[in-house]
Amino acid sequence: MRHRSLLILTATATVGALTLSACGSRDDKSGGSDSGSSTTVVIGVDAPLTGDLSALGQGIKNSSDLAVKTANKNNEVKGVTFKLEALDDQAQAGTGQQNATKLVGNDEVVGVVGPLNSHVGQSMQKVFGNAGLVQVSPANTAPELSQGPNWQKGDKKRLFDTYFRTSTTDAVQGPYAAQYLFDKRKLKKAYIIDDKKTYGAGLAGTFTDEFKKLGGKVVGTDHINPDDRDFSAVATKVAKSKADFVYYGGEYPAGAPLSAQITKAGSDAPVVGGDALYSEEYIKLGKKNVDGDLATSVGAPLETLDTAKTFMKNYRAADYKLPYEAYGGYAYDSTWAIIQAVKAVAEKNDGKLPGSMDDTRKQITEAMQDVRFKGVTGDVAFDEYGDTTNKQLSVYEVKGGKHEPVRTGTFGED
């Protein structure tokens, strides 16, 4: 779930990094370039750059920007300059679909990073799929985007070979939280709330299935409108239910006031959610009322990864106005994956891109399936569904005004 933006980059043909340059456009509209000139290609970014989720979106945009600048500086793909073009989807599916159409219509765009939100991702997939344009999301977690609508029945079917993601899915995120709360925290009674959106309802569903399987009891369920901010009626029901905790499938703009109102209603049950609650904005909105709340998020904390040290250092040095937030590392790796696919195509074609954009996009999509590198978030690679092979997750607890990591691992481990 998150923000998007677009940059325009120039690349040179080497694996792993692209250099940013001020080149104007491709040498010719057919997409070819000769050895003595530079071809400019565009990497699109789509995220919520304004609105309630803009903190996450801006972190995605900035991190993609950093990847592009690094690639261009290092002349990662010889003869290619990358540009970034960032578009704002405002976390709206219709806007995301319009942005996808706009990006497809730009014959310099070779790949797209984003979006943040799973429901926005659903609206964009077919547009990119029909055009053969690869997209790599750093934040979509709904399993059906990659494995089809019947994935829970074991009928997994990849609908679009252009769709990839660097974040793991709710097929493991929900169950991972259930396992932690039941086995490690010994919390047995849950009140389940979701916002009825693709991400929130799906995450709450996978959590609930696993929690019941473990022996947990659901003492109440509710749905809320994510645009509301008065949840007093639901908060009162939670307090009366004597639940050990509340599991909320939704995002931080509604999650924070929901948690605060549950506390004010007299319940000491912590609110637990997924990666959409793992944001500094959740704490800013909820203040001390959200102390003790928990959130799972994809991957390990960047601060614990040697692979992330250079990224964090360079991000600080770039002096971006907003933090990279929960998806910054994944946005950087998503952008780098596109750069690596471009590099592989250039190397396969004697140091230049194919003569037509249709061929270029087709070959980049094919190359993406085999992309592998050591990224900010760890080893980056994709399985047969386009999902990341990195299934690691973390649990964070709000302590002293910060999300403090309390557990990192993979679903099913002790």
Image (cartoon, rainbow, N blue to C red):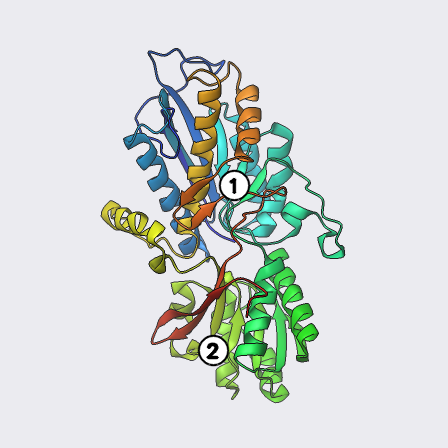
Answer few, some or many: residues within 10 Å of disc 1's Cα (few below 14, many 20 plus, some between 14 and 19): many
Front one among 8 and 360: 360
Q: Nearer the viewer, mark 2 or mark 1?
A: 1
Residue shown at 58%/51% (left/top)? 118
Identity, as a three-letter code, of the amino acid under mark 1: Val
Q: Is residue 125 left or right of residue 49?
A: right
Kindly give the residue lying farthest to the front in the view shown: 414
Front one among 186 and 247: 186
Where residue 297 sits in the image (x, y, percent)? 48, 61
Front one among 319 and 315: 315
Query: For residue 235, which numbered disc appears in the image?
Result: none
Residue shown at 56%/20% (left/top)? 359
Front one among 340 and 144: 340
Identity, as a three-letter code, of the amino acid under mark 2: Ala
Residue shown at 64%/47% (left/top)? 145
Where residue 263 sits in the image (x, y, percent)? 49, 83
- Distance (Cα) linking label 2 and label 1: 35 Å
Image quadrant in which you'd find residue 190:
bottom right
Answer few, some or many: residues within 10 Å of disc 2's Cα (few below 14, many 20 plus, some between 14 and 19): many
Report which residue position mark 1 lands on.
136
Where residue 253 sits in the image (x, y, percent)? 48, 64
Residue shown at 60%/78% (left/top)? 234
Report which residue position mark 2 lands on.
260
Question: Which element type, helix, strand or loop, lies under badge 2?
Answer: helix
Q: Is residue 43 left or right of residue 272?
A: left
Q: Is residue 148 left or right of residue 124?
A: right
Where residue 338 sits in the image (x, y, percent)? 46, 34
Residue 87 visible in the snapshot:
no
Residue 53 visible in the snapshot:
yes
Query: Is the C terminus in the top left, top right, bottom left or bottom right quadrant?
Result: bottom right
